[in-house]
Structure formats: C-alpha cells, structure tokens
Amino acid sequence: MSKLAKGTLFGRVHDFLKLYLPKQRRLSANTIRAYQKSLELLFDFVKNHNDVNLSEVTFEMLTADTVAAFLENLEAERGCSISTRNHRLAAVKAFIAYAAAMDITAVAVQTEIKKVPNKKTDAVIAVEYMSEAAISAVLDQPDSTTEKGLRDRCLMILMYDTGARVQEIADIKLGDFRYGKTPTVTLNGKGGKMRTVPIMVKTVLHLRQYISIYHEDKFDKPDSPLFYSVIHGTTKPISDRRIRDIVKEYGFRAREKCLEVPENVHPHLFRHSRAMHLYQHGMDLTLVSQWLGHSHLEATLIYAHADTEHKRKAIASATKPGDPMYGKLNPERFTVSDEETLKRLYGLK
C-alpha cells in the first residue's frame, strides 16, 4: 500500500465532516453527528490497538482486520446491536470512499475496507416497547407542583404523544405548534425532512400550563426553543443528553412501583411504545409509518412482528398442558414474514 502524506487522514476527516457532508450532501446536523461519532470511535480504537497517540493514526492503520476488530469490539465491549454495528461500518466506508475520491492514493485503503462485510441480522427484529401501564407509571413520577416536575412531565407527555425522536423534541420551537380544533406540531426529522403530527387536547393543556410558566415573556418569539437550559446566562435548546437523563431518572423511580417498566428507560422507547399502541388499537401500518416519518414502509414492519410475537406468547401462557389446544400451538403459525405482511399491505392477498 503506497504511503499517504503525513497529516492527510485528519485533513480529510475535517473536510468530510465540515464541508462535504453539510455543504455537498446537505445532511442534517443529527446525521453528521452520527458520522462524527462513528469515526471518533474508530480512531480511538485504532489508537489503542496500535498503541499510538491520536495524531499518529494513519490511513495505513485502517486495514480490514483492524476495522473488523473494531466492529467486534462495538458489540462485545460497548453492547451495540448488529444494526448499530452496520451503521458504524457504513459511516466508515462513506468516509473512505470520500477520501479515495479526493486522493487516488487512498483507493488502496478503500479496496481494503470493502472486504469488511455487514453482519446479518435475525430474520425477525425484536422491538422493545413499554406497556400502557408502564407508560402511565413513568408519566406519574414527576411532581407537577414544582416547575421542574411540570417541565419534565410535559416533555415526556409530548414525547409519547408525538412519537418524536429525542432530537426532534429538543429542536421544537414555540412557533411549531398550531392550536385549534385539530392541534398539531411540526417536527424536524432526519435528513431535514419535516412532518406535521396531531397532538391530543390533553397534551395541549399540559403545554399551555408549561408555556405560561417557562415562556410567559416569549409568546411573540416563535423561534424560542420549547424546552431549554440556561447556561451562564445564555438560553440554549435542551440537549438530547439532558432529555435522556430525565427519562432515565423517572424510569428508575417508576420501576420501583410498576414491574412492567423496563430496567433501562430511554427516549426512543417512548417512540416505539406509542407506535405499538397505535398499531394495537387499530391504526393501519401504513399510517403508523407516515406518522413516524419512516422513508420506507419496511422500517415499520417491526411493530407487526413484535405484536404477533406478543400475542403468540400470551396464547402460549394461557394454554395449559392439559388443554386440547396445547398440542396445536405452533410458533410458526404466528410468525409474520416481511414478504407476507407486505403482500397483505399492498392488497396482493
């Protein structure tokens, strides 16, 4: 492999993250952060793997074996899912492809990294979600007689009602709401895609109470962040990390009172839970897909899979060995394949 000039690697990293992704690809800040995190994790691993300082990491160290070891480390040490592992690999390959396009001497590195395959996932992807009782238990935890409790409950109610991603909640501004007979909020989703979702009247009541306290002097400032932090006298939108901490804290409290609450409650669990509850209450899967802001219907099929498995387990637990139906329990009868579900959704069956 021919040598690349010293310092080329991080120069390319800078241009990739600061120029190529935002200005040429026009990707959202959230997507760019995902690329940034993937490369940061990779270089930290390579640095330790080669026992060098970060500034000494070079293109030549990015071998297929090293990247494969990095991916295995993500699963074994950091507990990442196969899906996250594959996303990290996609980000690494995208950067290497950019570097090869900018400098022909990096083509050899690209050829090397192409040898690293994605890891296959199970045919049926499990989706974690909370029961409606668990959701209620978590939402009951904040003390709404205090300003902090009022804010935290409003935040979690809005998160559940809209099924918004954590960054979409953090990005909401006062001017994103439309009130009236059919209240809505506009969310800024992945890739800069915007979608408008309805919100319940009860949610509006919580919002108005929250806004009257936290935004009493900002009703004419539509660009003000709905949820914010004041740091050294400067108002900034609440961070996704702060939202995660809030949700985790109340999830821990709720579990002491309701065993249906999972050990690890995180923002995306609210999104999964709301989508699953809507599906279980009869909303068509295509509408759930649009409501979630999925680009492809296939991404929403996990809720059909999860709900079918949930029903199968419920039937199994309710059917005793002496029951005439016990011998007829067959998990395959309750397994939905992607193709079968799609055919039904498309009207082919």
Image (cartoon, grey):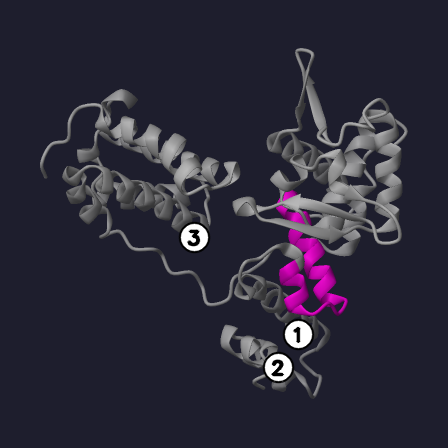
Q: Which residue is mark 2?
A: 329
Element under label 2?
Answer: loop
Q: Which residue is mark 1?
A: 316
User: Is the C terminus in the top left, top right, bottom left or bottom right quadrant?
Assistant: bottom right
Q: Which residue is mark 3?
A: 82
Whole-angstrom CA distance, mark 3 to mark 2, is 31 Å
Q: Quadrant of residue 127?
A: bottom right
Q: x, y (%) of residue 52?
A: 24, 23
Q: Residue at x 15, y 26 (%)?
A: 5
Q: Quadrant of residue 286?
A: bottom right
Image: magenta residue range: 263-290
Q: Is residue 196 above or below residue 254?
A: below
Q: Amino acid at mark 2?
A: Leu
Of callouts 3 and 2, the N-terminal one? 3
Q: Amino acid at mark 1?
A: Ala
Q: Residue at x 65, y 54 (%)?
A: 272
Q: Amino acid at mark 3?
A: Ile
User: Is the N terminus in the top left, top right, bottom left or bottom right quadrant?
Assistant: top left
Tell me if label 1 and label 3 are in contact, CB under 8 Å: no
Q: Is residue 148 above or below residue 328?
A: above
Would residue 259 be seen by someone viewing this image from the given angle?
no
Q: x, y (%) of residue 224?
A: 72, 28
Tell me if label 1 and label 2 are in contact, CB under 8 Å: yes
Q: Residue at x 24, y 25 (%)?
A: 51
Q: Is residue 118 above or below residue 96?
A: below
Q: Quadrant of residue 170?
A: top right
In magenta segment, residue 305? no
Whole-angstrom CA distance, mark 1 to mark 3, is 29 Å
Numbered disc in front, either 1 or 3: 3
